[in-house]
Image (cartoon, rainbow, N blue to C red):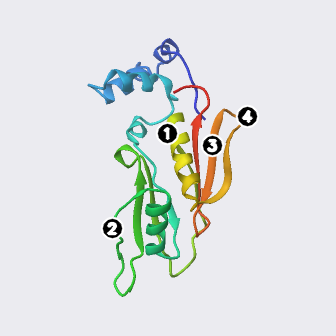
Amino acid sequence: MISVVSASEIANNQDHTGKSPLNRRIEYFQGATEAVSHRLIMTNPEHHPATLSARKIIPHWPSSSIPNTIEYYRDTLHFICGPPITTRSGLTEPNFVSVYMGPGAAANIYFFTSPRSPLSPGKAMIAMTKMGLEEYYGVLKGEGKVRWVEDLEDKSWGYRQFEVEDEDGNALQFFAFIEGD
């Protein structure tokens, strides 16, 4: 559970060492930038400071065919695809590929084939700017190659989104916040 508390509440909450969680975190991250210091204040004091170093999450999704997955994500969804890789000896086809979009591969998915046991399809959301979402939706709709799960619409929870699905049942929701950028 995430708690939002003020800096004074954190500073006044001291532990057995006489230091507040905020002071302990600042000491741990000496030289932290102003932005990081602000995030420290907004986190739950029970979380370990090392968790603040997380940068992204990369889901592992199933693929029945790495070449087909590359073709769909590259040619239909316009992702950038890494090279197909064979990670185990004795395989005649590649069993891994990384696909991504956005700066620094912000939206990144690893695909694997699994000869031993099938993986369950995955589902993820990719946040975009409002202008980027509208433009991307227009491109996909205009090309007519996408498997649509849900057309573009405004949701009551504050997102404008659409959802597509690949040949293995993996689903991607692309969304932008209705309010904001």
Instruction: Answer with mark 2 or mark 4, whichever residue precedes in sequence.
Output: 2
Q: Nearer the viewer, mark 2 or mark 1?
A: 1
Instruction: Answer with mark 2 or mark 1, whichever residue precedes in sequence.
Output: 2
Quarter of the view holding residue 85: bottom left
User: Which numbered marker is on residue 83?
Assistant: 2
Q: Would you place residue 72 above or below residue 103 in this image?
A: below
Identify the residue at image location x=43%, y=40%.
51
Instruction: Answer with mark 3 or mark 4, whichever residue precedes in sequence.
Output: 4
Identify the residue at image location x=43%, y=56%.
79
CB of mark 3 within 8 Å of CB of mark 4? Answer: no
> How much space separates mark 1 and mark 3, taking CA atoms?
12 Å
Residue in the foreground of this view, choosing between 73 and 136: 136
Instruction: Answer with mark 1 or mark 3, whichever residue precedes in sequence.
Output: 1
Q: Would you place residue 107 above or below residue 65 in this image?
A: above
Circle 1: residue type: Gly
Q: At which x and y percent is residue 151? A: 67, 49
CB of mark 1 within 8 Å of CB of mark 3? Answer: no
Identify the residue at image location x=37%, y=39%.
53
In the visual, does 128 lie left or right of 156?
left
Circle 3: residue type: Gln
> How much space separates mark 3 and mark 2, taking CA atoms?
30 Å
Circle 4: residue type: Ser
